[in-house]
Image (cartoon, helix red, strand yellow):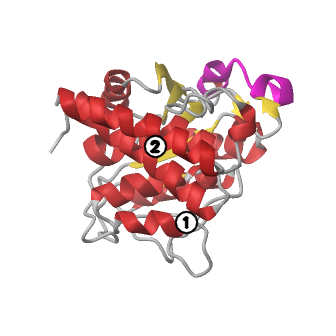
Amino acid sequence: MAESFKKLELLAAKARLGAIIGTYHGKSGHPGGSLSAADIYTYLYFNEMNVKPDEPDWADRDRFVLSKGHCCPSLYAVLAMKGYFDWSELENLRHVGAMLQGHPDMKSTPGIDMSSGSLGQGVSAACGMAFAAKLDNKDYRVYTVLGDGECEEGQVWEAAMFAAHNKLDNLVIFVDQNGLQIDGTVEEVCGIEPLDKKFESFGFEVEKIDGHSFEQIEAALNKAKTVKGKPFAILAKTVKGKGVSFMENQVGWHGKACNDEEFKVATAELEAEIERLEAEL
């Protein structure tokens, strides 16, 4: 059942809280990009993708590949809320032998369609899945999320050429454009703009959106279904660290966990937002 935008906002806030809980208990991880992409994950799993949590390997399911695999903590929270595993698993993030590791592992985690982490490679796997669907005359669709810094990787553009050459109109690429990567701003490290023109020149239909607006996410995905004969790229402008005041737009929160005091502040802010949204439903 499709969820209302208000319900999606609530689920995304809970996903952000889950990312903070996971990285805090793991004492490491990547909260910044997890928070910026939480709305995208939430919409895909609760309003867009045809999946069966009680049958995660269902052959006809839609596929999702997190190409920027380090930003999995909020994805894990979304999968937990969707019913793939228990929420309590989040507290075991990155622990030895735990189900949930610092990068997605398809062999140990229900709901993960592809192991990822080496930047640039996940999108290639997504292209392969979409191509396989074409070869097998299957109707499932494939979605992948890239980081904007990840678009500096050459393999991303090799995959883009493959997708356009093979007319993969069952493939949707999201780029989480939060503007920051591990060493600074994307523009300072290796500017990628104009990203829309690049994807268009590689044969994609492109839509630019506010990646925190469920209305715009929905409109872009609905448009993607009308495009035939070419893949679709959604360039989603986001805020790194979204939802936690001291993390927002701060490059230092790319890859570190909260200490005890920071954890208290972050969880208090997110829990207050959750309470506000629950009161409005």
Is residue 198 rendered magenta in the image?
Answer: yes
User: Who's the residue at 53% across and 33% down the image?
Assistant: 244
Crowd band around label 2 with a 10 angstrom C-alpha radius: few (<14), some (14–19), many (20+): many
In the picture, residue 276 is in which quadrant? top left
Q: Is residue 110 visible?
A: yes
- Between 197 and 161, the residue placed more toward the observer is 197
Residues rendered magenta in the picture? 186-200
User: Who's the residue at 34% across and 39% down the image?
Assistant: 43
Q: Is residue 68 visible?
A: no
Crowd band around label 1 with a 10 angstrom C-alpha radius: few (<14), some (14–19), many (20+): many
In the picture, residue 202 is in which quadrant? top right
User: Who's the residue at 69% across and 40% down the image?
Assistant: 253
Quadrant of the rendering where the N terminus is positioned: top left
Quadrant of the rendering where the C terminus is positioned: top left
The residue carrying mark 1 is 93
Image x and y of residue 12, in percent: 37, 39
The residue carrying mark 2 is 16
Residue kind at label 1, given as amino acid type: Leu
- Between 170 and 272, the residue placed more toward the observer is 272
Number of on-image labels: 2
> Closer to the N terminus: mark 2 or mark 1?
2
Cβ atoms under marks 2 and 1 closer than 8 Å: no
Mark 1 element type: loop
Marks 2 and 1, how far apart at CA: 14 Å
Image x and y of residue 83, in percent: 28, 63
Image x and y of residue 24, in percent: 58, 56
Q: Which mark is residue 132?
A: none
Q: Is 187 located above or below residue 87 in the figure?
A: above
In the picture, residue 228 is in which quadrant? top left
User: Who's the residue at 66% across and 50% down the image?
Assistant: 259
